Image (cartoon, coloured by chain):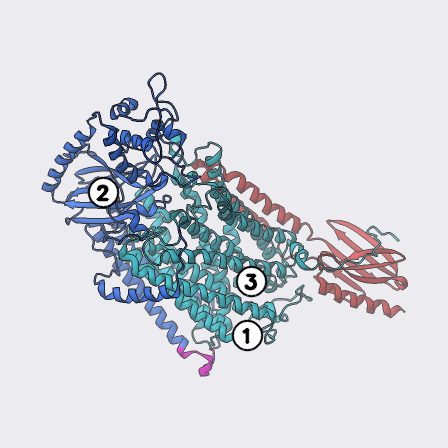
Chain colours: A cyan, B blue, C red
Amino acid sequence: MSTTTVAHHDEHHDHPTGIMRWLTTTNHKDIGTMYLTFSLIMFLVGGSMILGIRAELFKPGLQLMNPEFFNQLIGVHALIMIFAALMPAATGFANWMLPLQIGAPDMALPRLNNWGFWILPPSAILLTLPFTLALFGVGDGALATGWTFYPPLSVQGGIGVDFAIFAVHLLGISSVLGSINIIVTIYNMRAPGMTLMKMPMFAWGWLITAFLLIATIPVLAGAVTMLLTDRHFGTHFFDAAGGGDPIMFQHLFWFFGHPEVYILLLPVWGFIPQILQTFSRKPMYGYKAQVYSLWAIGALAVVVWAHHFFTAGMPVPALLYFMYSTMAISLPLAVLFYCWIRTMWKGSMSFETPMLFTVGWIILFGIGGLTGLVLADVAADAQYHNSYFVVAHFHYTLFAGGIMGIMAGVYYWLPKMTGHMYNEKLGKLHFWLTAISFNVTFIPQFFVGLAGMPRRIPDYALQFAEFNMISSLGAFALGLSQLLFVYIIISCVKGGQKATDKVWEGAQGLEWTLPSPPPYHSFTEQPVVK
Amino acid sequence: MQGMKKLGVCELAVGAFAWFMSLSAHADYTWNFPEPVTPMALDTLHVHNKFMIITAVIFVVVLAIMIYSIVMHRQSKGYKPVADKAPSTSVEIFWTLIPFAILLLIDFVIMGIPAYHSVVMMEDTRDQSTMVIKITGSQWRWQYEYLDGDAKGIKFVSNLSTTNGQMHNQEEKGENYLLEVDNPLVLPVGEKVRILMTSSDVLHNWWVPQFGSSRVAVPGFIRETWVQVEKPGVYRGQCKELCGKGHGYMPVVVNAISKEEFAQWSNKKQDEQKAANDVKEMSKDDLVAQGKVVYEKNCAVCHQVNGAGLPPAFPALTGSKIATGPIFGADGKYQKDSHLDRVLNGKGVMPAWKATLNDTEIAAVITYERNALGNAAAVDAILQPAQVKAARE
Amino acid sequence: MLSMCESQCVARPNASASNESVLKLLLSLLVLSGFITFGFVRMGAWMVLPFAGLELLLVGVAFVLVLRHRGDYEKITFSDEWVEIEQSVLGEVKHARFQRYWTRITLRETENGKTSLWIGSHNQEVEFGRDSMDNAQRAELMAHLKRMLLKTK
């Protein structure tokens, strides 16, 4: 008898409970849950910051805060919403659903997955800590440059900038770890028979997202590191007096920043068709066309960055190139919209909450896309740029296109994840409150922007007063409506009507073949995709 | 932070009511760009209107198709889904190329061609331009300098003139709240003015909505744009690149007048400037009085009206070592890190003022800071314009 | 992946990536990142380089870590008298043999909520299916093995 791995096993280990379970877990569902919970919490934190802003902007004059604090709130709001609310939500869904959808027992690198998540909370703390420190007289508060860190303002800024730089580094590491894990999982863990072109659309959306992250995060990391050395170690990357160029930072930042928009949206474009086919009871239209469109958008995403700073001045050929390439993004996007609507067409539609959010998402994201098309025009952009028109535009893409998409996903998969149905009536109420108050908030911002109100100002001229007041009222309604969202989720986790395995009558895909909620470890028998 | 007032329900209701009332009061409610007064702004408005109509048509058509589908093809009406087999590749390519082609046409022909001409027009700053001015953004004011013609050499700083009381709701807000300055930029109507833009500290962006041009002011670089105002009037705009705490408080005001009036104005301004540049001995009281005006316009944003500052970023002047210590060394030259050095050359967040303020203004503001704001400097209490002039050399 | 038949069970880790596809992926990432980094380094932003390099290295390492276990397998074979276990990790094959009559199987819970399956007799044990199976598969295999062992008794 030749044995090599021989051991005596007498001790009995308990299943870890409480905080230790969550700190050490390598289970994709646990980690997915943590990502989603973190995202929800940070969504509320970032949201309350902006409600402070909207309260200040409710009427002309300074009522609640001084301009420095105002500037801190806007920048940290954006960083939190982008890096700590939207991205973790998409990663949370990837952790939960990708293994289920491609028939894998877990993610390919479970321990890496755990580290990827646990980097997030410290970086969120780093971002917001300067607010607290300022209360104790240390430093002068958080990052006050807007989320874009433009030097020389950021070189001039206080310790808030340093904290934000470190936070962005950590968030970047977390995103890269998550991306690597997702790429490896999608490549190596698919069920037998599932070729790339048979993958669920969500996996495609995430694969391209992960590609974009890997391509662009080093650029962001490099940019903020150079900012740090400019601030403290006497380098002159962005200082004209030392031979540098402040505009180079904008190239670096937006080389990351523009793909970032698609990084936030591609996962949503992945699962939206899946929701549409479920509630239209009809397979999604144009799978191949959609996959190619996603790739086209991913490719265009990295070559259009300079349209974020047309007014910073560049040669005419560069202006024309960035204008036309930006307009070209609308081509694959038009194909996507066509496929989404064609999936609904002549289906047998029913309008449960996920479908309501999806239909609302298509309409509102459409507004965001169309206004984006107009923004590509260099000459008109001189007017739109940094006005409230842009603010309204990117909230149509990132709140409607991002967060409302995520909400559709939450309602769609919540019964699968918890094993309970959520309260359908409240869900629908949440949709209508969100959709209406969102528009009340942001439609006035289009007009106030056209009329000439710049963004990021703590106080404004009297002619903008009415629109701002409507916008603030809308924002408060929008904020309050999200408390209903939290209530619906909590009560769904706690209990409710049992969900069936399939949950939705028209559901298609491997995740719906598992029990609701799925067992701690997913597939007993490897499913085979024909 | 200023007093945390609570926005009560009552106040919200009052606010909503006030809004409804003001709807009727504001007849000139704007839903689009303000009236264009330059060729660029007119072009922008046309382009904008055209694009908005195109996108609105796309939106309405697509929405109508969706709504039709939502109304007709629903389960509750018993609509059965068509047995939609996955379409063959060629059918799929055909159908998906239709939206692709439509957008191709819109992007690169209907929108693309006029957009091309607009870009070329916007970037052509030199052709037929008859005047050059230089605009320098600094935290948080604009400096204007006329570089050629009758007005050559005219140079002044344009500061926000809205009072603190209005901002903090202690006074009634004026009609042009936050959009008013002490010295507006004066431009002749009908001339194509080439604008050279730069900055002395961080990025700024000079923007007048009715002009349709905006350009970032980058420190250490010159950027260009142009305006050709075609209608006399006063035009207002703002900085639109986040530039720190005073970002909301650096408006642009342009006074467009006829060429004749402009010639008169520039003569008058030239004389004034000559007079101001004459260095003459001044009494302490005169210096303090003028210094108070300069201080409140330029320094009080950071160091506060009472000199208390906003530590740690903006130190207090009251009791400050720099503001009470000696200025001149034994050799008669001003010392490094002295009061005069700091004002002239700046340090860190403190801007250098030597290009912005003239000798008299610097002498006045330093004398004011050393004798008011709770300070009474024992040495070098009074600084004369001549001393500043000497220090510059 | 777990395949079971009457007298032999084989467990293999999930592996859908071919060498070629992974190579293509890594190459395309290298070209993409390289191109971007080269552009920015030329602009003077050389600090992008170390981050891009580190990151690509990390992607490579991740694939190597996962893929080198592709050939791993674990096999249990029942003969009339013996239970033979063959475990191949990174090409190194280990054998263990227990008398069928005396073989005991235990399923234990570990700290992180995973189960571990142990096969052995006479105070000697071998862990089976630590990385290639999940809890449910281990439970299933356990049931199967118990059934097989009962047949002898």
In which image quadrant can residue B310 be found?
top left
Query: In the image, is residue A141 above or below residue A435?
Result: above
Q: Which amino acid, mark 1?
A: Trp
Q: Is the residue marked by circle 1 packed among few (<14), some (14-19), or many (20+) residues within 10 Å?
A: some
On the question of residue A194 being in view, the answer is no
Which element carries disc 1, helix, strand or loop? loop
Which element carries disc 2, helix, strand or loop? loop
In which image quadrant can residue B32 be found?
bottom left
Q: Nearer the viewer, mark 1 or mark 2?
A: 2
Query: In the image, is residue A428 above or below residue A192?
Result: below
- Comparing A508 with B255, the one in front is B255
Residue A199's disc is 3
- Comparing A477 with C30, the one in front is A477
Q: CA distance from mark 2 to mark 3?
A: 65 Å
The answer to whether B233 appears left or right of A315 in the picture is left
- The chain letter for the residue carrying disc 1 is A
Location of mark 2 (residue): B182
Q: Is the residue marked by circle 2 packed among few (<14), some (14-19), or many (20+) residues within 10 Å?
A: few
- Comparing C53 with B308, the one in front is B308
Q: Which amino acid, mark 3?
A: Met
Location of mark 1 (residue): A504
Q: Position of residue B334 (x, y in %)?
A: 34, 22
